[in-house]
Structure formats: C-alpha cells, structure tokens
Image (spheres, rainbow, N blue to C red):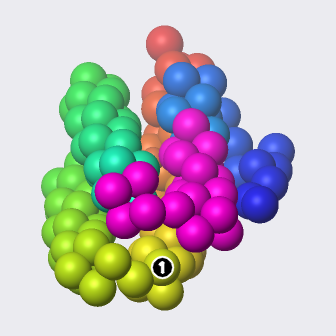
Amino acid sequence: MLVWEDSYRIGNEEMDSEHLILFAILNQISINIDADMAASCLNEVLGALEAYISYHFAHEEALMRAWGYPGLESHSESHRRFIEDVARMRSAALVSSGHEAAMRLRFFVLDWLLNHILETDADYASFIAAKAGNQ
Ligand SMILES: [Fe+2]
Ligand SMILES: [Fe+2]
C-alpha cells in the first residue's frame, strides 16, 4: 500500500488532490495484483490509470499555459513521453496477462510520478505561487 505524504504536496490544492487520486489508482492496481485478479480486471484498472493520467496532464498543461509558465514545452514533452511509455508497458502487461508485467508498470509509474511531482510539478507550482504573490 502506498501512503501519500504531506511532503508530496506542491501547494496547489487542485493538483495535489489529482496527484492523490493517481496514488489511489496505483493502490487499486496493487490490490488487483495481490488478489490475483483476472486479466480483464487488470485491463480495466490500467485503463483507468491511463485515462486519469491524460486528464491530469491536460489539466496541468492548461494551468501552466494560463499562468505563462516558461517551462511548459519541456514539461508537456515529459508528459507525452510518459504516456507513450505507459501505453507500451500496458500492452506488454496484457499480452502476457502477466501480473509481473503489471507490477513492473506499477513500480515504473510510481517512481516516475514521485520524481515528476517533487521536481517538475513543484517547479511550476512555485512559479505560479510567486506570480500570484506579485499580483
Ligand atoms: Fe506534470
Ligand atoms: Fe502532476
């Protein structure tokens, strides 16, 4: 079970709650893997993960655009690459219907997400906070 920690907050309430939901979906994947769920269940929960990731990224990119964040391009590029990697790994997990592949995907997503939140997302959050403070 992944435990969300306060230190993962970037200070934007809306984005923090979306990150929290991503953690919840990752926990759901672990539950499915632990319970040795059928591949169809795994497929469903991996689909939910991809859908929420796309939703969150689009939301975040719109926010950065609205605030004129200068790092928007490279941030969006990192989102795009991640979505491609997840899609590739999801196909692999489903072809083998392997829980091991699903577990690898879960670790990959968690690792990427934590690094991304703590560095890349934290950067636009402090940019926005500084800009909002100057208004
Ligand atoms: Fe991001
Ligand atoms: Fe994010």
6, 45: nearer the viewer: 45
Residue at horizontal 80%, vertical 54%? 3
For residue 26: magenta? yes
Q: Is residue 22 above or below residue 80?
A: above
Q: Give the main secondary structure, helix, strand or loop, of the magenta stretch.
A: helix
Residue 75 horizontal side relative to residue 101, left or right: left
Amino acid type, mark 1? His
Q: Residue 103: percent from the left, percent from the top?
A: 52, 78
Residue 135 horizontal side relative to residue 17, left or right: left
Residue at horizontal 54%, vertical 23%? 14
Residue 63 horizontal side relative to residue 126, left or right: left
105, 125: nearer the viewer: 105
Residue identifier under label 1: 99
Q: Residue 19: percent from the left, percent from the top?
A: 55, 42
For residue 33: magenta? yes
80, 63: nearer the viewer: 80
Is residue 104 in sight in this rendering? no
- Which contiguous range is marked in magenta? 21-41
Q: Is residue 45 above or below residue 135?
A: below
Q: Residues within 10 Å of mark 1 (few under 14, many from 20)?
A: many
Residue at horizontal 33%, vertical 56%? 40
Q: Quadrant of residue 6?
A: top right
Q: Residue 9: percent from the left, percent from the top?
A: 69, 43
> Does mark 1 have its CB less than 8 Å from ligand 2?
no
